Amino acid sequence: MPNTAPLNNVTAATRREKTIEVSVNAPVMTLPAVLVLVAAAMHAPVPAYAAAGLEILILLGGLALWWLPYLAGVTVPWATAGTGETWAQLHARTYAKTIIVLPRIGDRPRPSLEHMILHALLLAAATVTLVYALSI
């Protein structure tokens, strides 16, 4: 995982956290691209529709993880799975020193700029993938 601090939290994350993040997120984020390649090779829209659906699910998960705590003060159950910390504690330890452009809402954790960019890219990818699937 590249260190692009202060955009991401790589320097503050533990080795275990980095390993878990890569082992979970790499396959999940790679699968839609593989499905688009399969759709292109087969000239079939179904894998592209599946890729768009996965991208939308990934986006919804990211929005729930980052935006529910910020806007509604609600933390999703998987936010800190296995860490023994609350989302507020994990955020303070790992994301507080990243670039954050949103105003504070009380003491709620705020989405980092890195994740705001990622969410926009996921939305764009899902849109482009869906348009591609419709064109096959």
Image: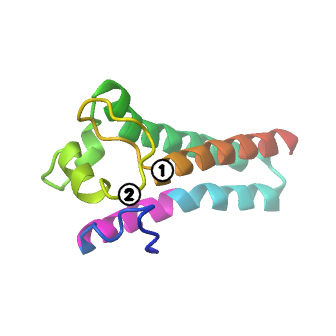
- The quadrant of the rendering that contains the N terminus is bottom left
Q: Which residue is drawn at 57% across and 58% down?
A: 31
Identity, as a three-letter code, of the amino acid under mark 1: Leu
Q: Which residue is drawn at 62% across and 42% down?
A: 123
| Label 2 to label 1: alpha-carbon separation | 8 Å
Name the spot of residue 111 as percent of width and height, x first: 40, 43
Q: Residue at x 46, y 74 (%)?
A: 2
Q: Name the residue under label 1.
A: 113
Residue 78 in the image: above or below residue 15: above
104 or 29, nearer to the observer: 104
Figure quadrant of residue 127: top right
Is residue 105 one of those drawn in magenta? no
Is residue 20 one of those drawn in magenta? yes
Which residue is outermost to the right?
135
Q: Mark 2 points at which residue?
A: 98
Is residue 11 shown left or right of residue 67?
A: left
Is residue 128 shown left or right of residue 92?
A: right
Q: Give the range drawn in magenta.
A: 16-28
Visible in this render: residue 81?
Answer: no
The number of numbered discs placed on residues in the rendered structure image is: 2
